[in-house]
Image (tube, rainbow, N blue to C red):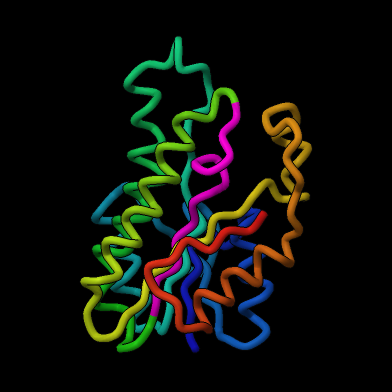
Amino acid sequence: MRILIVGGSGTVGQAAAKELAKRHEIVRAGRSSGDLTVDVMNDDSVKAMYAKLGQVDAIVTCVGHVHFGPVATMSPEQFRKGLNDKLMGQVNLVLLGMNNVNDNGSFTLTSGILDRDPVRQGANAAAVNGAIGGFVKGAAIEMPRGIRINAVSPGLLEESAVKYDGFFPGHETVSAARVGLAYAKSVDGALTGQVISVG
């Protein structure tokens, strides 16, 4: 299969690419690196990327930022960061990329653990992750041409533990290899409308 991974140079994207590249041709896209460049929050940029990409069998999205901070002092603008970036960025890739996915292909989005196991200052991430899960469940029953859609919801990766030190008290880390397998389960398997949790 030919697979597009958007955000393929990030920690999660690399985990997905490493596993999927064992069996498939990988095309990477990112804001500033990869085979193609794209700003997922800009519709014209997404359309231009898809025009260059052509047809693929699967699209995997490992992109998006959220705001970490206390609810008591969070502004609506800060909260919208996650909605506009991680949520709508990935939704844009689905809505605008439908025609680029071959019959019986798939989309795999990325959410995260905080909607099911929250931490202080993570309310924006929790809301966004929950919305991504809701989107894939709702979209799955309407996808055309046998296209499937799922989300992978990884816990704190071992490779990211230092970066997020102190934010995830008591959370067990998960290996990149385990996260990569979750993407393989979505892409190579038969599931649709599912949130595949890791950790």
Image vertical order of residue 86 relative to residue 98, above or below: above
Q: Is residue 49 left or right of residue 180?
A: left
Q: Which quadrant holds residue 20? A: bottom right
| Residue found 57% across the figure and 62% down from its top | 8
Q: Which quadrant holds residue 182? A: bottom right
| Image coordinates for residue 38, horizontal then vertical, percent | 40, 57
Q: Is residue 63 left or right of residue 142?
A: right
Could one spot residue 39 in this view of the protein?
no
Image vertical order of residue 125 relative to residue 150, above or below: above
**Residue toward you, 152 or 78:** 152
| Image coordinates for residue 111, horizontal then vertical, percent | 49, 51
Number of marks present in the image shown = 0
Q: Is residue 38 left or right of residue 99?
A: right
What span is colored magenta in the figure? 106-119
| Quadrant holding the C terminus | bottom right
| Image coordinates for residue 2, horizontal then vertical, percent | 48, 85
Membership of 147 in magenta stretch: no
Q: Which quadrant holds residue 179? A: bottom right
| Image coordinates for residue 73, horizontal then vertical, percent | 45, 10
**Residue toward you, 141 or 27:** 141
